[in-house]
Each structure stands twice: as C-alpha cells, then as structure tokens.
Image (cartoon, rainbow, N blue to C red):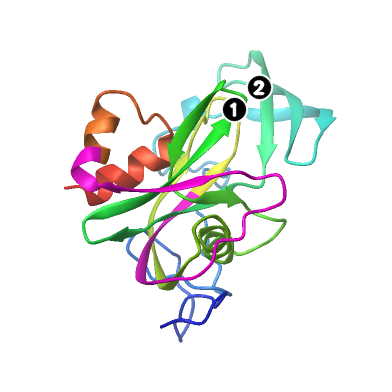
Amino acid sequence: MAAEGASPRRVAGELPVAAPGDVVTAGERPTVVSGGAAPAGADRDGTARLRERVVSRTSQWQGNIFSVETLDVELSDGSHGYREVVRHHGGAAVCAVRDGRICLVRQYRVALGCATLEIPAGKIEGDEDPAVCAARELGEETGLVARELTLLARSNGSPGFTDEMTHIYLAHGLSRHEAHPDEGEFVDVAWMPLADALGEVRRGAITDAKTIIAILSVAG
C-alpha cells in the first residue's frame, strides 16, 4: 500500500523522450515534442507551405491561469495574418480504473453552465512535472494514490487558439486515502462501469475531451 500523499514509483536510468505507454513518475519530466521551426531550408515534414512566421506579438491580458496575446504572422505566400492566442501552462489528468469501473469527478463548470463528469485533473503550476501534478490532483480530488503512472496520451484541446496541453496518465496500483479538495473546490466522486462511461460518451453526455480520450483508450 502506498503511503498517503506518496508520489508514484521513480523509474531509474536516463530520461528518454516520453511517449504514450512510457512510465513517468515524479521528478522525471517528459520532453514534449511540439511543432517548432525547422532549420532554414529544411522541409522534413512537408509542411513548409503551411508554416506561419511570427513577425510581432502584443500582450493583451495577463491572468492567474492564462494570458492572451495577438500575433502578426507572415504566411508562406508573403501575405500577413492576425492571430489571437491564449497561453496556458497546461494540465495533467489521471485515468483511474479499478474492477472495471473508471473514477470520475462531478463538478459544476460555470463556463458551461452545468455540471460535468470528468477524470481527475488540474493545472500545472509553473515548471511543475506533469506527473507530479497528476498525482497531486488525483489525491486531492478523490483520495486515491497510484503506485505508478503511465503516460496514456497528450491532448491539445483547442489548437486553433491556445497552446494548452493536457497530459493524461493511466494509474496503476491504486490505494484509497482521504480526499482533500482545494479551498472552494466542490466535487463528487463517481465510479462508473466502463461500458456505461463509453455509452455516456456516445450519447453526448460526457463531452470533456480528456475524459473522452481516457475512456476510449481503456474501454476497448
């Protein structure tokens, strides 16, 4: 049994680029490979004609969770475009399954005006390791502690306007302790049979992207 608040088991050795299926634990930050600029003259992925070069950027708003900036970009044909971008530290989530049931949390989302069913998740604090964030949020919201976390997938929820990325982990070796949600956070824990969760996705009752990815990944 893992001790309350314990981080998942550390994996020894050199840290590789994390990919879905890798075991990632506290202190071992996965390297995120994103679409950076290619070397001059290179077009290894065949997307040179699609790339947009940032000419200038203007900060419009800075909040506690995200910031907003506007960009002037040069397109491959020489014309210019205007972009509005939300910058976000990203988040981490945990798919916890035991005895054929998935752990979900029900909470009210004021942006949507309704309650949702989601896998436990939270925002990454600064340069925090996503695995550490995932373990913390799992414990805070549900009281569960995982012996280890396996990177299941990464999700860019709305790449058209934000760089927010959610790291989704699969929990192994679960033990139960006492939940301790953040101040002002009210959630109910619901254990749902995987077949029922899949049905909720298909009928449009579960709409959260990270939760859909988690359910589709494990329900098969």
Picture quadrant of residue 5: bottom right
Q: For marks 2 and 1, give the CA distance.
A: 6 Å
Residue 74: which disc?
2
Q: Hey, what amino acid is under mark 2?
A: Glu
**In which quadrant will I find the N terminus?**
bottom left
Q: Residue at x 58, y 59 (%)?
A: 140
Locate residue 135, reporting x and y percent.
52, 65
Position of 71 with respect to 59 (left or right) is left
Which residue is at 49% across, 70% downward? 177
- Regarding mark 1 in the picture, which secondary structure is present there? loop
The answer to whether mark 2 and mark 1 are in CB contact below 8 A is yes
Kindly identify the amino acid type of the residue bearing the numbered disc 1.
Glu
Does the magenta portion include 102?
no
User: Which comes before the other along the chain, label 2 or label 1?
Assistant: 1
Left or right? Give the position of 131 relative to 170: right
The stretch in magenta equals 167-196
| In-image side of 71 versus 163 (left or right) | right
Check if residue 181 falls in the magenta segment.
yes
As drawn, is 18 to the left or to the right of 187?
Answer: left
Residue labelled with disc 1: 52
Above or below, 46 relative to 186: above
